[in-house]
Image (spheres, rainbow, N blue to C red):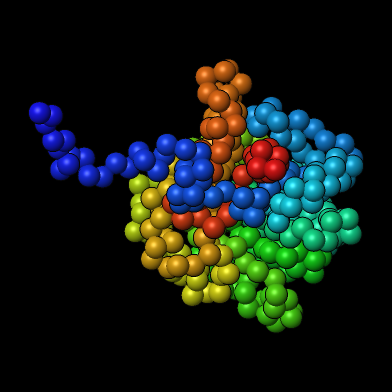
């Protein structure tokens, strides 16, 4: 006589839905698409592109190479690009006045993009560090301290300059107190009602920004100084919620968490608490770690990239700034 099978164990077999590709697709909880991608692009005054050694595969783009990038972004339906300028040393000053020059690199590039790729949203970085001779995101007093309110006034002028040139979104990444409200009011006064603000609300004083600072040419200006007096302490989580709450109250349309991969808990807490449009920035150090490890053959590059971005989506990000945007768009197509 055959023994009866033990029907009490296991009643639940989660592996059943993982047995076939069809059901793995049907039960997939999160999906990455081109609609989730923002492509950060470095621009400079030269006509041709120049490689960035610390960001393998990325370039400082001139007008000619930028056109090729725009064509690819359009072809793969990437919704938005974010501009980060590389400013010639001659234009860097203590007061960063070149940041609101209407004939400067960023306003001219905005107009160029709107002429050649009007369906792509243009996001501009509102920050002083590419323009300051000292590499800080704010103005300094005689004691070398960041002066908050005076810096905000310059940031307002910079945001207005970008809006006048046709930017769809301005993205203050400086972490000065009160700047979102001041920028929002200034945009409204000039009837730039539809210009959105992405507030870098929780930007941490991370060790992962090195390749970016090299790319925009602020690393040498900053030297041994740090940004700890305005960027957030890496150990803090509740503080991020306070920062996000303030920026939403001041008129932000979207909030940003930066970096992404080491701060998935922050992304999740912000999304769950505020149910507000939340972006995350996969920063230069995150990019370079993956790229260099893949180049050594230690990981599967495509799988690792997709996994990294899906983890950010899974945490709650609505969209991701990533230097992998074009690569991922090609993979997904």
Residue 252 appearing in the image: yes
Front position in the image: 272 or 35: 35
Is 25 positioned to the left or the right of 169 in the image? left
Q: Identify which residue is drawn at 53% across, 64% down.
A: 277
Q: Considering only vertical position in the picture, is 240 above or below 44?
A: below
- Please provide percent x and percent y for residue 211: 61, 35
Is 292 positioned to the left or the right of 162 in the image? left
Quadrant of the snapshot with the C terminus:
top right
Quadrant of the snapshot with the N terminus:
top left
- Please provide percent x and percent y for residue 21: 51, 39
Q: Identify which residue is drawn at 74% across, 58% down.
A: 122
Is 74 positioned to the left or the right of 225 in the image? right
Q: Considering only vertical position in the picture, is 98 above or below 157?
A: above
Residue 44 appearing in the image: no
Front position in the image: 134 or 125: 125
Q: Considering only vertical position in the picture, is 300 above or below 64?
A: above
Quadrant of residue 292 in the image? top right
Q: Identify which residue is drawn at 71% across, 51% down.
A: 78
Furthest-front residue in this view: 1
Front position in the image: 104 or 49: 49
Q: Identify which residue is drawn at 65% across, 42% down.
A: 332
- Please provide percent x and percent y for residue 82: 69, 52
């Amino acid at each position: 006589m055959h023994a009866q099978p033990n029907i009490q164990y296991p009643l639940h077999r989660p592996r059943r839905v993982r047995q076939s590709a069809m059901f793995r697709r049907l039960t997939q909880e999160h999906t990455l698409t081109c609609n989730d991608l923002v492509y950060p692009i470095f621009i400079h005054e030269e006509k041709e592109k120049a490689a960035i050694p610390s960001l393998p595969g990325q370039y400082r783009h001139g007008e000619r190479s930028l056109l090729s990038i725009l064509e690819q972004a359009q072809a793969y339906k990437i919704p938005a690009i974010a501009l980060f300028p590389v400013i010639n040393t001659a234009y860097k000053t203590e007061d960063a006045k070149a940041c609101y020059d209407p004939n400067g690199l960023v306003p001219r590039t905005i107009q160029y993009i709107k002429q050649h790729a009007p369906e792509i949203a243009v996001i501009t970085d509102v920050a002083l560090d590419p323009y300051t001779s000292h590499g800080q995101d704010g103005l300094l007093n005689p004691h070398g301290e960041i002066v908050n309110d005076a810096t905000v006034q310059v940031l307002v002028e910079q945001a207005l300059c970008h809006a006048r040139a046709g930017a769809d979104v301005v993205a203050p990444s400086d972490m000065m107190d009160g700047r979102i409200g001041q920028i929002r009011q200034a945009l409204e006064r000039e009837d730039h009602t539809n210009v959105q603000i992405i507030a870098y609300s929780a930007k941490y004083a991370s060790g992962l920004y090195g390749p970016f600072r090299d790319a925009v040419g602020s690393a040498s200006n900053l030297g041994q100084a740090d940004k700890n007096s305005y960027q957030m302490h890496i150990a803090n989580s509740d503080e991020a919620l306070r920062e996000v709450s303030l920026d939403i109250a001041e008129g932000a349309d979207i909030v940003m968490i930066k970096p992404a991969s080491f701060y998935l808990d922050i992304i999740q807490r912000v999304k769950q608490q505020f149910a507000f449009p939340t972006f995350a920035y996969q920063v230069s150090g995150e990019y370079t770690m993956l790229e260099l490890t893949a180049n050594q053959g230690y990981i599967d590059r495509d799988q690792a990239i997709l996994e990294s971005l899906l983890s950010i989506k899974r945490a709650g990000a609505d969209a991701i700034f990533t230097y992998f945007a074009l690569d991922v768009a090609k993979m997904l197509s």
